[in-house]
Image (cartoon, grey):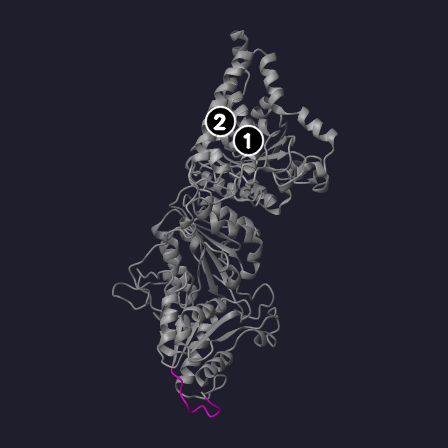
Amino acid sequence: MPRTKEKSKSAKLPPNYPGHERAWHLLYLGRLIDNEAPNFLRKAMGWSYHAPNAGHDAIQLALGCSFRASHDHLFPYYRDLTTALAAGLSAREIILNGLSRDEDVAGGGRHMSNHFAKPEINVHNVSSCVSNHIQHAAGLGRAVKYYKSDAVVYASFGESSASEGYVFEALNGISHERLPVVTVMQDNGYGISVPKKDQTANEFTADNFKGIDGAKIWHVDGRDVIACFKAMHEAAEYAREQRGVPIVYGMCVRIGSHSNSDNHQLYRDEKELAEAKAHDPLPIFRKWLLDEGHLSEDDLKKIEKAAEEEFNEARNYAEQASKPDPATAMAFVFPPAFEPDSSGTGNPAGGPLVQHPEDTKGRGLTLRQGINAGLRAEFRANPDTFLWGQDIANKDKEGIFLVTKGFQAEFGHERVFNAPIAENFIMGTANGFSRYDQKIRVVVEGAEFADYFWPAMDQYVECSHEWYRTKGQFTPNVLIRLASGGYIGGGLYHSQTIEGALCNIPGVRIVYPTFADDAYGLARTAMKSRGPTLFMEPKALYNDPRTRCQIPEDFHVPFGKARVRREGTDVVVFSYGNALLMALKAAEELGSGGTDNPVGGADAGGTNPISVAVVDLRSLVPLDTDTILEWTKKTGRVVIAHEGPEFGGFGGEVAALIAREGFEYLDAPVQRVGAKYAPIPFSTALEPAILPQPADVAKAIQQAASF
């Protein structure tokens, strides 16, 4: 073979090209693995989900080789087998993932097969929610830019999932902030069985985004190896220079079915299938290597033999590797939490108290001020803390409820800033940003009102199982603030409290403070902990003087620890949020046998006092089951009161716990108080008919006491 010709040809190749021998080795090895995957399923050994990448090989090779392991960041999608191989995963690691073995570096079999990752080298573990990882890429790009790295972040997915709204949200953010993120769209013409013409009016899906400022789209033949390398190199340079939105759009061909659960013969005819196979990148590239004199037939066969040996070794090893131990199935659900020395009782233990500029009379802090002070303490202690959300900081407007008032002035525009009205983007970028370094802590206002959080739900779910599906390799260190609840005449989308729905999703700690000291202490504990925490704030109580407390500066509240707000012997009320103050009022009135409206006494005359204990749950996930059972045993009569709907509400979980583990202690049926099963109306004449009132709590206490 004329080596002088090879040298001259190679001089014209892009710098990200690994050389002909390496390129062919990766392509051939990737195809061997891709072809073998269905056989593992037929042998009942695993790989029950496989999306073949044949036809995508060229663009994937260029993407994987352009990525610099442990420096850049890569978010592949489920079809990116050759991408992962070229990026630094071994054949053994890829097959271990396919077979869901315990040694799988992506997550030890906790995630679907064909979801290739190796967090150790920054090949990130992504979910099956296709293309939503572009939000993580945007957030990570923000961190790369803030910390002045020259890394590039790559996000890869198919053209059909570009129809998802969060793709536009991310590209809009990448444009606005000029983030170093390269988007790679691999177009094979189908979303499972849905042809592209049913997805979008544009023949080339990427053209849907060409109006975004700074967008530059490389339309490339995704089957042409050298053209793909050239496009990837130019796009990476464009990203590094932070010039806009680089999109590499590779026209690929899908040779096989979408996955092993799809039969493409139901919607593709023989002519189309034959045409697809005729455009297979591997024989085309092999022929080019021979025709151009880059490699001889002997060279190619030698490379192929080495790849086959590597493949056989990897296959044999993976087949013998251990499956995950079922005893570990519950491991890695929750990341480690900070464990404060404080008992969380709220009693000052000496030392200075928290000072706040709004507390000019020394009366203590309100709930709003307590949250502000707790977050501020952690922002001062840790320079790698950040805050963003809607209406967070614009001149004198510092959040619609002023909870984070003064933050941008003290910590600067780079750490505290506004986000677009795009809740999914707010959450997704928080997840991505925190990937840059585990010392980072992000606080987001997930939505201005909890009711508006629903567009962010897929990213909330992402946060919930990152720790689990990576087998403890990554968790987003994010505190998610939500102004929650009613009693403000807000109506629909301004009055919901949504903890009942969110507690059903494992992996996120959920707290619901009512008083300033708990808000302060829980905020500080959450900011010191690893993993996501949902911080529910009863907004009707933000400035309520009843929430005021004097707070020791070093006060922290542990997760999973309830707080006894009032002692009693006859009935116990378990509560939190707005309903907690109702319970305390009812307990006081009933304890004195009073008849003051709206509480009333223990009987029609109000002459029989009831001794009522009130326990503030304050931490819903984890839940303090010991304290709940302890007070159930002490009183024998239980009321559970919360603001959310009684039907399907969180109180049902508490009642079920008591029925299962404390039934022998009960002297009366458990009483529940919650909102009626209806939307919350806007009219202040109608709202009280839906949301629980103090009289409702008092009535439930009386019913429990009289049984």
Q: Earlier in the sequence, mark 1 or mark 2?
A: 1
Q: Residue at x 54, y 18 (%)?
A: 13
State the extent of the magenta-drawn residues as a range.
Answer: 603-611
Q: Position of residue 524 (x, y in %)?
A: 37, 57
Q: Of helix, strand and loop, which mostly describes the magenta segment?
A: loop
Viewer-proximal residue among 224 and 410? 224
How many residues crowd mark 2 within 10 Å: few (<14), some (14–19), many (20+)? many
Residue with the mark numbered 1: 36
Q: Is residue 604 magenta?
A: yes
Residue with the mark numbered 2: 311
Disc 2 secondary structure class: helix
Q: Amino acid at mark 1?
A: Glu
Q: Position of residue 8 (x, y in %)?
A: 54, 11
Alpha carbon distance from label 1 to label 2? 10 Å
Q: Amino acid at mark 2?
A: Phe
Left or right: 423 as drawn, with respect to 265? left
Q: Quadrant of residue 203?
A: top right
Residue 271's place in the image compared with 673, above or below, is above
Mark 1 touches mark 2? (CB < 8 Å): yes
Q: Quadrant of residue 50?
A: top right
Q: Residue furthest front?
A: 43
How many residues crowd mark 1 within 10 Å: few (<14), some (14–19), many (20+)? some
Residue 249's place in the image compared with 681, above or below, is above
Q: Position of residue 636 (x, y in %)?
A: 40, 78
Disc 1 secondary structure class: helix
Left or right: 192 as drawn, with respect to 602? right
